[in-house]
Image (cartoon, rainbow, N blue to C red):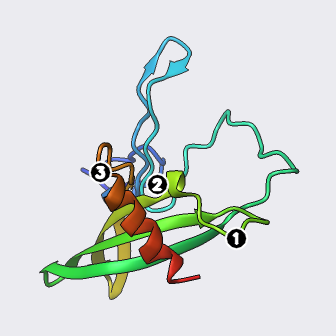
Amino acid sequence: MSRPGSSRGLSGDPELPEADRPVPTRRRGDQPLGEQARCGLRGERGRPAPSPDHLTPTYVAKVREVRALGQDVALLRAVAGLLPRGQAELNPAANAIQSIVAVRRHGSWRNTLFQNTPAQFHGWRELAEQLTAELCELL
């Protein structure tokens, strides 16, 4: 039951904090224009299940920086790569630069924003090679 003056939000749960409510998916006809998720809620409706032949690669990640943006807000910057199953070398095309903004609520840290950018370094091949070498040191 909702309290007077409160909104039920997209989840239908008036007790769910605003930051944990899913973001609506904009649609044009029957085609989604994009999906967003907050705090682990996933927009996986309509996606086919992974092939049973698909082997999840090994993830390699390095935290480069954690910076306090306030008493209860922090920015984490990291880099990540993928080692395909059965391979001895990282796949440089899968390298990524990641940022997470975390907020402390009720004594625990929660991810409020995750940005994953492919580390393509267009025109700067030496930077891509340096990142791959940095991640290979973690293997």
Q: Residues within 10 Å of mark 2 (few under 14, many from 20)?
A: few
**Amino acid type, callout 2:** Asp
Q: Which residue is mark 2?
A: 13
Q: Nearer the viewer, residue 3 or 27?
A: 27
Q: Is residue 59 above or below residue 23?
A: below
**Res. 110 in view:** yes
Q: Nearer the viewer, residue 9 or 85?
A: 85
Expressed as whole percent of the image width and height from the top left, the position of residue 112 reads: 33, 63
Callout 3: helix, strand or loop?
Answer: loop
**Where's the N terminus, which quadrant?**
bottom left
Expressed as whole percent of the image width and height from the top left, the position of residue 128 reads: 38, 58
The image quadrant that residue 122 belongs to is top left
Q: Residue reaching furthest left? A: 70
Q: Residues within 10 Å of mark 1 (few under 14, many from 20)?
A: few
How far is disc 1 from disc 2 in space, using C-alphas? 47 Å
Residue shown at the point (32%, 83%) measured from the top left: 106
**Amino acid type, callout 1:** Ala
Q: Residues within 10 Å of mark 3 (few under 14, many from 20)?
A: few
Q: Which residue is mark 1?
A: 88
